[in-house]
Image (tube, rainbow, N blue to C red):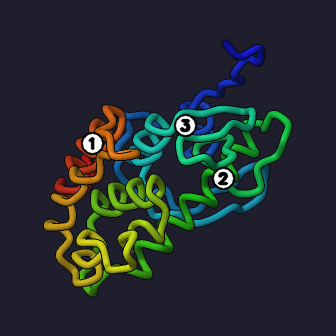
Amino acid sequence: MSKFKKLLCSVTAIAALITGGVSVTDPAYTSSIGAVEIDGQLIADVQISPRALDLIGNAEGCRRDPYRCPSGLITNGIGNTHGVIQSPASDEQIAKDWIKNIQASERCLYDTKGKPELSQGQIDAFTSFIFNTGCTRFRYNRDKTETRIGHLIRTGHYDLACHQLNRWVYGGGVKLPGLISRREKETEICLSSNGS
């Protein structure tokens, strides 16, 4: 048993800093967030919806203190592995890091996608997936060949790519219940027209 306490934080509170408090009953819940301002500072312009924030945040969890994730990376906040500080992070810092990481996942998606436009549900699901796997793993297999999901998105076959999400449920060669649940939610959102 560890002698250190985990310093947890609220995904809902962090998401509220980003969205201004959009709730599941709000029509904006399944629409693009757009410009994100925190502490009077423009952080980024993101395409995902508040629903995607809920999906990603609830799957990743939120910790103020640094810890080693299952992949062995030093992590804090909501899946943040970049510039991790050794002291507990504030809600505002966690929100800023989360948005920067989401923006990087969106950039990977948009640099990969084919000509057809993505639906809001596809943007939300694929961004969640890339946030989880990382851009390189989303695009390439371990032998450096192109992944099937990456190929399908690159060639504009988004509905077929949605059906690939449920294949990505293994960690260390073992099916993980958390990944099974996350991929089911991503697939459902991906196949909907707008993520609702």
**Residue at (53, 33) in percent of width and height:** 61
- Disc 1 marks which amino acid? Lys
Inter-mark Cα distance, 3 to 2: 26 Å
- Disc 3 marks which amino acid? Gly
Q: Residue furthest bottom?
A: 115
- In this image, 65 relative to 79: left or right? right
Give the percent coordinates (x, y) of residue 125. Answer: 33, 55
Inter-mark Cα distance, 1 to 3: 22 Å
Tag 2's secondary structure?
Answer: loop
Numbered circles on residues, count: 3
Dot 3 alpha-carbon crowd within 10 angstroms: few under 14, some 14 to 19, many 20 or more? some
The nearer-to-camera label among 1 and 3 is: 1
The foreground one among 64 and 35 is: 64
Tag 3's secondary structure?
Answer: loop
Give the percent coordinates (x, y) of residue 186. Answer: 28, 49
Inter-mark Cα distance, 1 to 2: 24 Å
The residue singled out by tag 3 in the image is: 21
Tell me, for residue 81, which label it has, or none: 2
**Residue at (47, 73) in percent of width and height:** 108
- In this image, 179 relative to 38: left or right? left
The nearer-to-camera label among 3 and 2 is: 2
Tell me, for residue 137, which label it has, or none: none
Q: Residue furthest right?
A: 87
The residue singled out by tag 1 in the image is: 185
- In this image, 137 relative to 71: left or right? left
**Residue at (36, 34) in percent of width and height:** 178
First in residue order: circle 1 vs circle 2: 2
First in residue order: circle 3 vs circle 2: 3
The foreground one among 30 and 4 is: 4
Image quadrant containing the N terminus? top right
Rendered image quadrant of residue 75: top right
Rendered image quadrant of residue 113: bottom left
